[in-house]
Image (cartoon, rainbow, N blue to C red):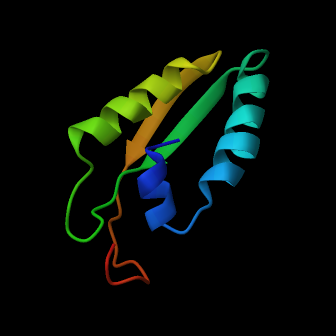
């Protein structure tokens, strides 16, 4: 649900996420409480910038019933060297 440019970086297609995943999650959360899990990782040794975090928060506001948001980070080496 983050900034589209970051989603491209991690090899998701923006259209697929925006059109299918986000639509389904938004629709489902209108009638059912959801728990959102988000992993913030360093990408190319850089943490998410303020703009990305603000966009993330704005997208959360579009959802219906959010019970809680669980944020975590990578505690082990990732398969990709840039994570």
Question: Residue, x 54% and y 69% (percent of image)?
Answer: 11
Compare residues 10 and 25 and report the one nearer the observer: 10
The residue at the point 22 percent across, 55 percent down is: 47
Residue 47 or 4: which is nearer the viewer? 4
Q: Position of residue 2 (x, y in %)?
A: 46, 43
* Total tally of numbered discs in the picture: 0
Picture coordinates of residue 6, whole percent (x, y): 42, 56
Q: Is residue 15 left or right of residue 70?
A: right
Q: Residue at x 77, y 24 (%)?
A: 27
The percent coordinates of residue 83 (x first, y second) are: 33, 72
Q: Is residue 72 above or below residue 74?
A: above
Residue 45 in the image: x percent, y percent?
Answer: 20, 69
Q: Is residue 66 left or right of residue 83?
A: right
The answer to which image quadrant residue 26 occupies is top right
Is 77 or 20 nearer to us in this picture?
A: 20
Residue 76's place in the image compared with 25, above or below, is below
Relative to 26, residue 83 above or below: below
In the image, is 32 to the left or to the right of 73? right
- The structure residue drawn at horizontal position 59% and vertical position 62%, both measured from the top left corner, is 12
């Amino acid at each position: 649900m983050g900034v589209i440019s970051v989603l491209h970086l991690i090899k998701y297609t923006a259209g697929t996420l925006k059109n299918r995943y986000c639509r389904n999650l938004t629709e489902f959360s209108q009638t059912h409480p959801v728990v959102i899990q988000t992993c913030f990782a360093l990408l190319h040794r850089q943490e998410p910038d303020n703009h990305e975090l603000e966009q993330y928060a704005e997208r959360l506001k579009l959802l219906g019933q959010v019970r809680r948001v669980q944020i975590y980070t990578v505690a082990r080496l990732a398969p990709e060297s840039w994570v």
